[in-house]
């Protein structure tokens, strides 16, 4: 096995581990939202404070589900890497290149179009809705989009670097 081949498996493994760590931040932010929701439910005295309980609980639950789901899927992927690589390294590289390209495309749509659009809609609604529950829902949505945008921006940069490394290694596998 050449150094390039070993580096590809190592790069794929390091990428998956970094994704798991990054995904765990979704769950941690979700847990923080749930704890804040509990605090507002327990200690909040005003209508505005009470209005944040359910929106923050929903945002927290969604972020926890997202984070745990991504951690689990990356654990499964990480466990499958060595066998897939040792079975057919060229096919492994090709599938990872295709998956990385598709993921980068999905990130570009989500991060640069969908998340900002949702944030703008929620921010715009803040000017028109006066009920505390609606305002709390808008602010909670903006907070969730900010968390997702921050974490996914880092994930995008990591995925682009991973794709670049795989692309640079591809000629070594085509010559086999």
Image (cartoon, rainbow, N blue to C red):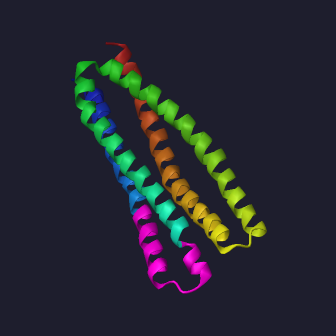
Up-down: is 96 above or below 147? above
Instruction: Work out whether residue 167 can be spotted.
Output: no
39 relative position to 172: left or right: right
126 relative position to 41: left or right: right
Residue appearing at x 42%, y 38% in the figure: 162
Residue appearing at x 59%, y 41% in the figure: 108
Task: Give residue 151's position: percent from left, percent from top.
Answer: 48, 54
Task: Give residue 20's position: percent from left, percent from top.
Answer: 34, 48
Q: Is residue 32 magenta?
A: yes
Task: Give residue 83's position: percent from left, percent from top.
Answer: 22, 26
In this rendered view, identify the residue nearer to me: 36 or 114. 36
Residue 106 sits in quarter = top right
By secondary structure, the bulk of the magenta-drawn segment is best described as helix
- Which quarter of the rendered picture does the N terminus lie within? top left
Q: Residue furthest top?
A: 176
Up-down: is 107 above or below 6? below
29 relative position to 137: left or right: left
């Amino acid at each position: 096995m050449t150094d390039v081949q070993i580096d590809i498996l190592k790069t794929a493994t390091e990428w998956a581990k970094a994704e798991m760590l990054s995904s765990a931040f979704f769950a941690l932010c979700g847990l923080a939202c749930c704890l804040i929701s509990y605090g507002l439910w327990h200690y909040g005295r005003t209508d505005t404070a009470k209005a944040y309980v359910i929106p923050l609980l929903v945002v927290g639950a969604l972020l926890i589900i997202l984070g745990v789901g991504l951690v689990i899927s990356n654990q499964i992927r990480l466990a499958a890497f060595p066998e897939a690589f040792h079975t057919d390294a060229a096919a492994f590289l090709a599938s990872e290149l295709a998956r990385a390209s598709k993921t980068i495309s999905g990130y570009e749509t989500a991060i640069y179009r969908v998340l900002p659009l949702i944030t703008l809609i929620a921010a715009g609604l803040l000017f028109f809705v006066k009920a505390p529950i609606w305002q709390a829902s808008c602010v909670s949505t903006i907070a969730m989009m900010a968390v997702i945008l921050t974490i996914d921006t880092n994930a995008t940069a990591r995925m682009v670097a991973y794709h670049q490394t795989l692309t640079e290694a591809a000629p070594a596998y085509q010559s086999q």
